[in-house]
Image (spheres, rainbow, N blue to C red):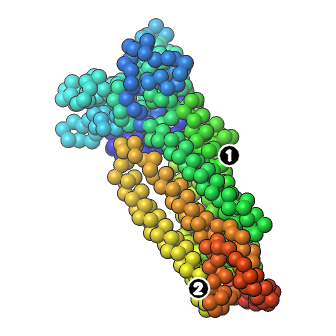
Amino acid sequence: MAFTSWRSTLLTLLVLASAVSASVHTYISDSFKEVGNAFLLSGGSEGIVASRVGPGDADKWNPYRISDGRSFIRFENITFWRSKEAASQHSDKEHSTGLIQAIIFEAADRDNIGGSAYGGQRSICCTPDLAKLEGCKQGEVLRRPSAVDFNWPVVLNTEFNGNYLFAKMDPREVHISKTGMYNLFFISCDPVMKGLYMSGKTYWKNPDGYLPGRMAPLMTFYIFMALAYFMLSIIWFTQYVRFWKDVLPLQNCITLVIALGFFEMTLWYFEYLNFNITGMRPVGITTWVVTVGAIRKTVSRLLILSVSMGYGVVRPTLGGLTSKVLLLGATYFLASELLDIAENVGTINDISGKARLFLVLPDAFLDAFLILWIFTSLSKTLEKLQSKRSTVKLDIYRKFTNALAIAVVASVAWIGYEVYFKATDPFSERWQSAWIITAFWDILAFAILCVICYLWAPSQSSQRYAYSEEVGEDADDEEAQFLTRGTSEGDVGLVKQEKKDKNYGNTDDFTLEDDMEEDKRE
């Protein structure tokens, strides 16, 4: 067999394996691929924290507790199947008629697997030339001991007997005593094993449960995020209930986003908790969680867009733009839902790189389009407020614009860091800090929501002054009372209220006409 370059193929398999998200890896008639001079199947890759107890300390752990302090990779019901052509080349009385090797190694020791003779192409299996140079056994995987532990990488052998079509692997449990990113490959060096496939399960466990090491910190993070949303909801609902008669539609939208955020963070925590206990992610539960998340992200973005257009403060409705905003929201929800399902439901490596890129691009394009529309709308709103000399509202919108600008700059910088992080860590060796990539976006969304809540909190005069277009010092005083949640006192307040009542209807008519003209231009 002509040896082909397998290093790039192995790199691809390692990257795909590192995306596996289920700690119970299930193989259902998974086929081996020909890589160089071997047939290879990736069994998965996960970050595992070192066990807190030794392999022989059975008295120190409770088998009925998931957080028993043990870390291991366990093989259960692993069965290999070969083709009839491969089995027919042996008699039923022969022994060791085919070898399958399971190899577990840290990502840092990946160069200890395979080798090259005389500077030629690298091969996984031991060749006659490599046998002379390395002292390996021909027909088996070339393995060099790790500099840290001579027993690693771990190699587990399973052999076919006679002319049997299948071979069962003995139940094994490999103890993990060192924290690292571990990879599992099933390899056969027999050239007649074409068509080989396997079924069974492997269990990958950390000291505190089945949750993969890079995902474990997120479970704690979602607890804190749920608490943060809960505290924000208490503050917001206190104001909401206090001034419920004067609540604006905009403030109802803010209430919905807060509720969705709290609900989503709570659901993520329980989804991860279930994952940690069972080692699996039920399709129904995970789909429900990501759907709530997609709804929250969609409503949040539409809220920011609506605020930028002046909805609830400068204009009572979005007018002719309502259908366009809703259409954009529906499109964004669909793109976000498909991407989140692909990344979270089942195992991530069920989706190829090109397919994932196909789902990421629409989501990124819609986000960019939303940002452009938001800042364009903000510019128009600021111009309108400036022309009508609504100084207090103008100041608030300027603060909102500055907050959004900071958020966009932070997002662009973080995307650059994320690209750098993934490009410089192809084997996920920095898996212990990878959770921060996901956490940042939730923190940023919460921060923007807090800014909106602060700037547009309910007050006793929300309805009266929301769409007013006052000019002059008296108007600014009244507007300031509304926006700073101040209260009028004595007869002075009554006089101002009467003055406002006389002009309120005409002011609103002017505002509506102005909005209709703007909608026509849009």
Is residue 334 left or right of 55 when viewed as pictured? right
Q: Which of these two is toward me, 345 or 96?
A: 345
At 55% from the left and 49% from the top, the residue drawn is 225
Q: Which of these two is toward me, 396 or 46?
A: 396
Residue 522 visible from this viewpoint:
yes
SS at circle 1: helix
Q: Which residue is mark 1?
A: 288
At 49% from the left and 26% from the top, the residue drawn is 67
Q: Which residue is mark 2?
A: 391
**At which x and y percent is residue 394?**
58, 82
Q: Quadrant of the C terminus?
A: bottom right
Amino acid type, label 1: Trp
At 26% from the left and 26% from the top, the residue drawn is 149
**At which x and y percent is residue 409?**
44, 69
**At which x and y percent is residue 399?**
53, 75
Residue 29 visible from this viewpoint:
no
Residue 131 sits above or below residue 331 on the image: above
Amino acid type, label 2: Thr
